């Protein structure tokens, strides 16, 4: 049984919550940056401290015990209380203090950056002494940082399947299918479906987009999560791939890219402002989120 609660106990409890949210020891390795054996040892240590089993793992897979479920509820309540206490004690004087950590998707349109800048301007005109950190990352990485509560807010194109997050749509971005000089479609004004299916496309590993992509080519020997990497494959003249229209525009103006069947091979991607539902926002985070929503209104 736990007597006094020490920092090591809080660490073990955070690990326990991460394991449950990830769905098991193996799935939690990337989230926690630990080996499966290390996670297992620390979970065993927590169970020893508590005096009862939290989960079962074996051939039947990972499963949390009834006592583990009760501890999970209590632990989440504990962390919410700790976070609320931290924010409340920091803001007793009425001045906004602390830090705001915002994740921002890569290669966004100039107008998006201008709106983020507008939100920063609004926030800096408040009575505040806050450190703002902007982190540019891929959508999957931003979701991981949000789950770890290492980001307060994030702007990106998300899967929207994370039940732990709240999402607010901000804007949409149009994606076109592109090819480059040297590719057979570059001089083809109206390629048919057969010609498209013969193309080698660039795969985007963030899989939820695929259901929206009009082009579902089977040939795929290139893979890139970054926009710049996708562009490099397309510019080789050997691949077709999707790029944000605003990002491709300057290359298109130079004659180095061409949209393929723009009318029916394009689609829109919704960008959202996401935050962790269990993360209790302080006054600074609330104010900055308010300023962001006003800037994108």
Image (tube, helix red, strand yellow):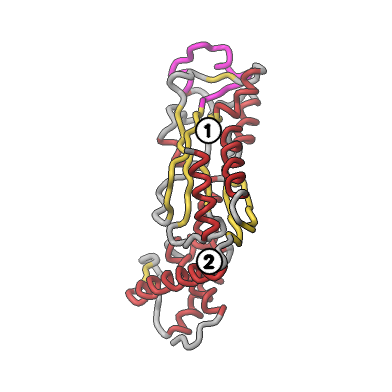
Q: Which quadrant of the view contains residue 90?
A: bottom right
**Residue 149: x percent and y percent?**
53, 60
Q: Earlier in the sequence, mark 2 or mark 1?
A: 2
Q: Is residue 63 above or below residue 263?
A: below
**Relative to residue 160, is residue 236 drawn left or right?**
right
Q: Quadrant of the N terminus?
A: bottom left
Q: Residue at x 48, y 19 (%)?
A: 262
Q: Residue furthest right?
A: 254
**Relative to residue 225, is residue 166 drawn left or right?**
left
Label 1 crowd bin: few (<14), some (14–19), many (20+), radius 10 Å: few
Q: Which quadrant of the view contains residue 131?
A: bottom right
**Residue 289 counted in the magenta span:** no
Q: Count of labels shown?
A: 2
Q: Which residue is mark 2?
A: 87
Q: Secondary structure at mark 1?
A: loop
**Relative to residue 169, is residue 124 drawn left or right?**
right
Q: Is residue 197 above or below residue 103?
A: above
Q: Secondary structure at mark 2?
A: helix
Closer to us: 32 or 8: 8
- The boundaries of the magenta stretch are 176-196
Q: Is residue 222 visible?
A: no
Closer to us: 165 or 233: 165
Q: Residue at x 47, y 38 (%)?
A: 297
Q: Which residue is mark 1?
A: 220
**Residue 91: x percent and y percent?**
55, 65
């Amino acid at each position: 049984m736990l007597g006094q609660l020490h920092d090591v106990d809080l660490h073990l409890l955070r690990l326990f919550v991460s394991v449950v949210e990830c769905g098991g020891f193996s799935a939690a390795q990337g989230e926690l940056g630990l080996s499966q054996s290390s996670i297992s040892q620390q979970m065993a240590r927590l169970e020893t401290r508590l005096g009862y089993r939290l989960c079962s793992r074996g051939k039947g897979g990972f499963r949390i015990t009834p006592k583990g479920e009760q501890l999970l509820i209590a632990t989440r309540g504990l962390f919410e209380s700790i976070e609320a206490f931290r924010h409340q004690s920091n803001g007793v004087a009425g001045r906004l203090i602390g830090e705001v950590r915002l994740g921002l998707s890569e290669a966004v349109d100039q107008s998006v950056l201008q709106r983020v800048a507008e939100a920063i301007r609004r926030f800096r005109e408040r009575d505040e002494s806050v450190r703002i950190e902007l982190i540019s990352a891929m959508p999957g990485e931003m979701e991981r940082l949000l789950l770890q509560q290492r980001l307060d807010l994030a702007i990106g194109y998300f899967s929207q399947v994370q039940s732990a997050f709240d999402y607010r749509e901000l804007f949409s971005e149009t994606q076109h299918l592109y090819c480059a000089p040297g590719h057979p479609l570059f001089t083809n004004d109206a390629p048919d479906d057969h010609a498209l299916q013969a193309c080698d496309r660039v795969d985007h590993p963030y899989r939820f987009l695929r259901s929206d992509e009009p082009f579902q080519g089977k040939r795929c020997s290139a893979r890139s999560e970054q926009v710049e990497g996708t562009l490099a494959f397309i510019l080789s003249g050997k691949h077709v791939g999707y790029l944000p229209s605003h990002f491709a525009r300057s290359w298109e103006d130079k004659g180095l890219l061409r949209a393929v069947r723009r009318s029916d091979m394009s689609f829109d991607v919704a960008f959202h402002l996401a935050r962790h539902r269990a993360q209790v926002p302080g006054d600074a985070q609330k104010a900055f989120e308010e300023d962001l929503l006003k800037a994108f209104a």
